[in-house]
Image: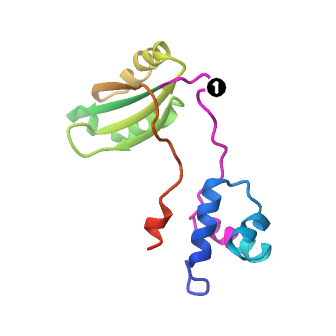
Amino acid sequence: MNDAEPFDAFDWKILALLQGNAELSATQIGERIGLSQSPVSRRIARLKAQGYVRRTVALLDRHKLGLSAQIFAQVKLSAHGRTHLEEFTAAIRDFPEVLECHVLMGSVDFLLRVVAKDIGEYERFFFEKLSRVPGIQEVTSTVALSEIKSTTSLPLHSASG
């Protein structure tokens, strides 16, 4: 935050409420944290402008949409494949089935979170798309049976000190 408007407890509270329900109005947020609508609106605009709120989205229920399979794929690139890292990342970004891609340290290079209608659809994705990306040496796929916890909420209490 800039010097004129320091990041304070109200900002932390606003962020916590927004990540729980971004449809809350500035008035509703203000009622919960003890500020009027106007300063809450200004603070939200500032938090967005400064990148603390990257975007506001609707979180969809993948099960209701028929995307019952969730697979974690560990990808190892060949030594030659590492020289084409930009091509790999561009290909992964183009696959709508891949929800997340993380660079790892250790014996594998990337961890992908993939969703599909079922295992058969994942198999098609694997053979028709993923395995055709140049430079991939090995993919180890692990099917998630169920979710114990899934959240988009960050632990703001840890960050606020």
Return the x and y of residue 10 as percentages of the image width and height: 62, 75
Q: Is residue 130 left or right of residue 2?
A: left
Judged left or right of residue 104, residue 122 is right
Which x, y percent locates residue 14?
64, 67
Residue 75 visible within the image: yes
Could you tell me the amino acid type at mark 1? Leu
Asked whether 51 falls inside the magenta stretch, the response is yes
Vertical relation: 106 (above or below) 20:
above
Residue 87 vs 130, above or below: the answer is: below
Q: Which residue is mark 1?
A: 65
Q: Could you tell me which residue is drawn at 59 percent across and 62 percent down?
A: 16
Vertical relation: 6 (above or below) 69 = below
The spot of residue 27 in percent (x, y) is: 79, 67
Closest to the observer: 88 or 112?
Answer: 112
Give whichever of 51, 147 is nearer the camera.
Answer: 147
Q: Which quadrant is home to the N terminus?
A: bottom right
Q: Is residue 55 visible?
A: no
- The residue drawn where x is 30% and y is 26% is 139
Q: Nearer the viewer, residue 45 or 147?
A: 147
At mark 1, the secondary structure is loop
Question: What are the residue bounds of the magenta stretch?
Answer: 43-69
Residue lying farthest top? 120
Q: Residue at x 51, y 29 (%)?
A: 97
Query: Where 30 sits versus 68, above or below?
Result: below
Tell which of 88 and 145 is nearer to you: 145
Q: Quadrant of the C terminus?
A: bottom left
Query: Quadrant of the rendered structure where residue 63 is?
Result: top right
SS assignment for the magenta stretch, majority: loop
Count the numbered circles shown: 1
| Residue 112 horizontal side relative to residue 13, left or right | left
Indicate the position of residue 145 as horizontal and vertical percent values: 42, 25
